[in-house]
Amino acid sequence: MLFLIGEDTNASNLNFLLEQYGINAKSDKVVSAAFNGKLMHPRECLITDGITNRDLSKHVRKYVYPHGCTLTTQRPAVAVLSTGANVYPYSCVTAAVHETESGGRIAVLGSKAAFSDKYLNMEDNTALLDWVIGYLAHEKDCTINKLDAATSSTTEQRRVANTGALAVKPKVAPHALDSLPGNYVALIHNNLKLYGGRTDLMPEVSKLYEALDLPRGDIRLIPPQFEAPIPDLEPAVHPPVIIEPYEPKLDLFDLDEELADEDTRLARVVGRGGDIDSAITAMGEIVGISRHLNPADRTKPNAILHKLLTAVVQFKMFDQGDGAAPAPEADHTVESFGNNVNVMRVD
């Protein structure tokens, strides 16, 4: 059985029958959210991404949905078409099918004009009609994918607040409550004048003085005390103070200092002057003497000078070409301090 719902269809009577099979027709309208150039009326919707079952996508890719409504489905009914993302309301069911236990099949489409002469030859509407008739006739090529039937991607409509009506209403700034007046009777009279009210219970209230044995005029309003978890709101009179982001913490290097040769670096140490001990320590680090000392002696000027003078004396003890000393043995090695100090070391 095929149901085609039109604009003049009495949905309440039809839903009385379709609800037994998990399908319900709504009384809303499907409207196109974008102009497509082919269909001029906003109720004539071209849906290009509304196929929700992969078996149907083999036959239909896009279809025209004119003057239609949306449906709601519940299992075991299966949604096969939706409005997609370019039609309002978004991703709502437009066609659904159901198969009974005895093998009977029902198909419901929310637009009776989709298969009319005007729209039948547009896009894939003819192929859609062939698939629907083939599904109702139990043809082998017109089936429903069970996996897609269990995981439908359609969404139900949700009611939202009327933001347009809320936007035009005046907004009251938060402020502290005024203290209650001492003469509460005036407060009651003013409310009665502004808003009206009943005074039937005033005699009973007046009898409370005698019941409580209190003189008249001693009953006062007690302001209630509420425990607020957050402080009271106050209107903002100054713009928020935005903290400037911190500068990136990067290590800064002096390229001239790091890439200078030994002669230049030694000259700078001499030019700075200052303490002689710190100058000797810096020179020993530059020419490489400090790396031959123990870590505890690298900051001691006496240890640096002792290492340097010992190396110079050992160097002068070797033969310099005048026969003063024999040539070094094979186990003698050359120890280099920088680029200008090279001495022979005897192990």
Image (cartoon, rainbow, N blue to C red):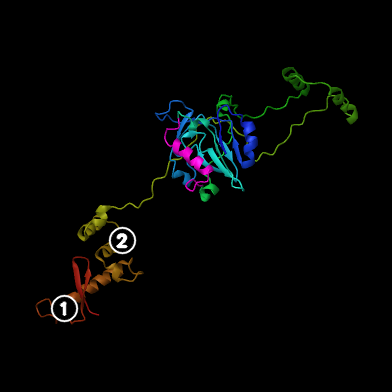
Pinpoint residue 256: horizontal percent, then vertical percent. 24, 53
Q: Looking at the image, can residue 139 be seen?
A: yes
Residue under the point 56% across and 32% down: 5
The answer to which of 47 and 315 lies nearer the viewer is: 47
Q: Residue furthest top?
A: 193
**Left/right of residue 306 with respect to residue 217 in the rendered view:** left
The answer to which of 176 and 332 lies nearer the viewer is: 176
Q: Quadrant of the C terminus?
A: bottom left
Pinpoint residue 254: horizontal percent, then vertical percent. 28, 52
Pinpoint residue 278: horizontal percent, then vertical percent. 31, 61
- The span from disc 1 to disc 2 (Cα, nearest Å) is 32 Å
Which residue is under mark 1?
Answer: 318
Residue under the point 74% across and 19% down: 190
Q: Looking at the image, can residue 230 be seen?
A: no
Q: Tell me the magenta residue range.
A: 119-143
Which residue is under mark 2?
Answer: 278
All told, the count of numbered labels is 2
| Callouts 1 and 2 close, C-beta under 8 Å | no
Residue under the point 47% across and 47% down: 141
Q: Secondary structure at mark 2?
A: helix
The answer to which of 93 and 209 lies nearer the viewer is: 93
Pinpoint residue 169: horizontal percent, then vertical percent. 58, 24
